[in-house]
Amino acid sequence: MRSYHLALSVRLHLLSPPVGGDKHKVKHMPKSYKTEVCVQGEWSTNGCRYATEAEATEAGHELLNRWMVPTDSRPAPSEDPVNWCFNMETYRGEALQPTTTVTV
């Protein structure tokens, strides 16, 4: 199920239509999304990069359930390569192994 979830996430990310109202003005699509958490009024992040904004959002919600210090979370675009996926069955982020292949 994990490889299917990852493949679906990457496929949805790559096949998403361009963002923006005008067909000639296309907003840049990020390579990945990161989760940022607010700690004492400042936003911080870690090295986890997700294929979709939805995965980064869920990862932030999961962090807020475990951690006591952060007061908020948000997804943010990133130019880093995807290196994590969010497993909705276990409600945890999972590191992608270097041997993981994705067929699109």
Image (cartoon, grey):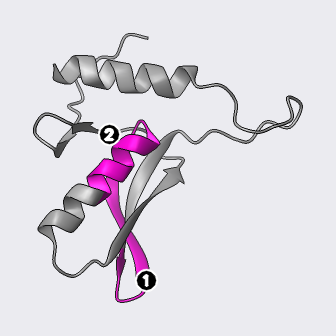
Above/below status of 79 relative to 31 = below
Residue 93 or residue 22, whichever sits in front: 22
Q: Quadrant of the N terminus?
A: top left
Please state the extent of the stretch shown in magenta in the rendering: 38-60
Q: Residue 83 bears which disc, if any?
A: 2
State whether residue 9 is above or below residue 54.
above
Disc 1 marks a residue whose amino acid type is Glu
Indicate yes or no whether the magenta region holds residue 40.
yes
Where the C terminus falls, by quadrant?
A: top left
Residue 46 location, x and y as percent? 32, 62
Most distant residue in the top direction? 103
Mark sitting on residue 3: none
Q: Which residue is mark 1?
A: 42
Q: Position of residue 13 (x, y in %)?
A: 49, 28
Residue at 29% x, 17% y: name it.
101
Near-viewer residue (37 or 102): 37
Q: In percent of the image, x 40 and y 42: which residue is there?
A: 54
Which mark lies nearer to you, 1 or 2?
1
Whether residue 52 sits left or right of residue 4 in the image: it is right
